Image (tube, rainbow, N blue to C red):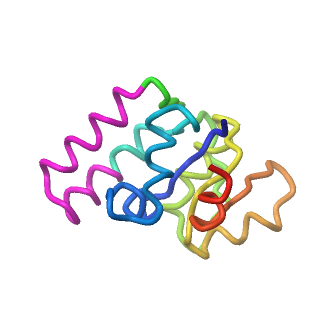
Amino acid sequence: MARLVLDTNSLLQCISHRSRYHDLWLSLIDGRNIFCVTTEILQEYAEILDRKAGSKFAELALQVITNNPFTLFVTPYYHFNMIVADPDDNKFVDCAIACNAQFIVTEDTHYNVLQNIEFPKVDIIKLDDIILKI
């Protein structure tokens, strides 16, 4: 069992039952992994899901996440601002640090800068790689 933070694009790619990454979503729902989120992340999920899949789907997805016993809600008390190229991504980094996550699951290259930062250490993993670990 690993603590994971999903960037929004990773969530979009794994939530559909037709996706080859759907087992990641299932692992977060059934407790094989812990889904780490903050209020700010949930707000972004809601906004993007609403835009991409409609308000009803967004509402249902957020209900599943927030009512899931394997979702860990954290409040970051410090903002590290480690991603300069896209500061909006820092909410995922701060969440990962606050919950001591093993990985941020992302395909976004802005996170690659984290590989060069020794402290605090935040590891990223691609969807194809996390699927092999589930």
Residue in view at x 57 percent, y 64 percent: 127
- Is residue 73 among the parts visible in the rendering? no
Rendered position, 96 above or below 17: above
Splitting the image into 4 quarters, where does residue 115 fall?
bottom right
Residue in view at x 60 percent, y 33 percent: 77
Q: Is residue 102 left or right of residue 21?
A: right
Q: Is residue 52 left or right of residue 128?
A: left
Residue in view at x 53 percent, y 64 percent: 87
**Position of residue 81 measured from the top left corner of the image (x, y, whole percent):** 64, 56
Rendered position, 108 above or below 133: below
**Position of residue 23 measured from the top left corner of the image (x, y, whole percent):** 48, 52
Image quarter hosting the N terminus = top right
The residue range painted magenta reads 45-68
Residue in view at x 71 percent, y 45 percent: 102
The foreground one among 112 and 77 is 112
Q: Is residue 14 magenta?
A: no
